[in-house]
Image: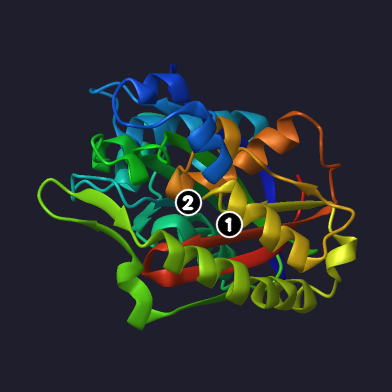
Amino acid sequence: MTGSHVLALGHYQPAKVLGNDDLAALVDTSDEWIRSRVGIRTRHLARPDETVDEMAAAAAAKALAHSGLAPSDIDLVLVATCTAIDRSPNMAARVAARLGLAQPATMDLNVVCAGFTHALATADHTIRAGAASAALVIGAEKFSEATDWTDRSTCVLTGDGAGAAVVVAAERPGIGPVVWGSVPEMGGAVRIEGTPPRFAQEGQTVYRWATTQLPPIAREVCARAGITPEDLAGVVLHQANLRIIEPVARKLGAVNAVIARDVVESGNTSAASVPLALSKLVERGEVPSGAPVLLFGFGGNLSYAGQVIRCP
């Protein structure tokens, strides 16, 4: 085998939906203020007893069911998350136990909002190296647990959920080369720190970095995949903020692509946002099977990672 491809997808969101008017009852804000600044209308919140691994397993179970594989076929589980409180067993091991997997390698990755695209690249590299043949790659977050619900600048952003992909070996690669990196000296612009951990960010710093520095990197991702932005059928950026997604997509030049805007109904779900949005696009049939889709995660550490995949 010379590569890997995404065979199937799945996603999960908690039942509770928090609208902008609900937030206006908690802090000094309004539906108009939130929509005009970040584009979000609703977000899903986990139950107090609902865990990161529970949401991750729900999304993974759907992806596995769609793939047609048996649990015993999976030999690698990667969970991207920055909001898991427990350290051991890690989220990947807990997902494996919930799904009854046999003896997979299990690893968590914390690259915050770029976590899923880092994990997808890691799975692709592992399969290419012959160390695995079928992987579950999951982004899952309980961001509400790290949210200060008295801070109107951040509480309007966050949501909970999970998205998952089944990645398998393939003779014809369906996952393109990754372009990844970070800006360590600016890493403090996005923080989840303290006891209990709380999310904070320097919004203008992140906005300027994302809208000015990321479009050329996204174009490089396309170039390494051997396509142009005009060839893309879909663009799934980290669902941070509509005011970031739209200018980055416009500067990229993906004029024929469907642009994922799941942030409107899901909020910022950090590492879950890319697979969650991608799974919804595929479920709705908005991107045809086999078409090229750009995935691009960015955020905490000021890290980024992107690749072009062939839509399952």
Q: Nearer the viewer, residue 212 or 62?
A: 212
Q: Residue 220 in the image: state x and y as whole percent.
A: 72, 78
In the rendered structure, which amino acid carries the disc numbered 1? Ser
Residue 54 visible in the shown view: yes
Q: Nearer the viewer, residue 181 or 135?
A: 181
Q: Residue furthest left?
A: 195
Q: Secondary structure at mark 2?
A: loop
Residue shown at 37%/38% (left/top)?
95
Left or right? Give the position of 20 relative to 142: right
Position of residue 44 relative to residue 261, above or below, is above
Task: Write the residue at 37% across / 50% down.
Answer: 81
x and y percentages locating residue 192 in the rendered image: 26, 55
Q: Quadrant of the C terminus?
A: top right
For the N terminus, which image quadrant?
bottom right
Q: Earlier in the sequence, mark 1 or mark 2?
A: 2
Regarding residue 42, the answer to whether it shows in the image is no
Q: Which residue is mark 2?
A: 75
Q: Are marks 1 and 2 in contact (CB under 8 Å)?
A: yes
SS at badge 1: loop
Residue 83, given in percent of the width and then of the height, sits at: 29, 46
Residue 257 in picture, x, y percent from top left: 84, 52
Q: Amino acid at mark 2?
A: Asp
Pointer 1 residue? 133
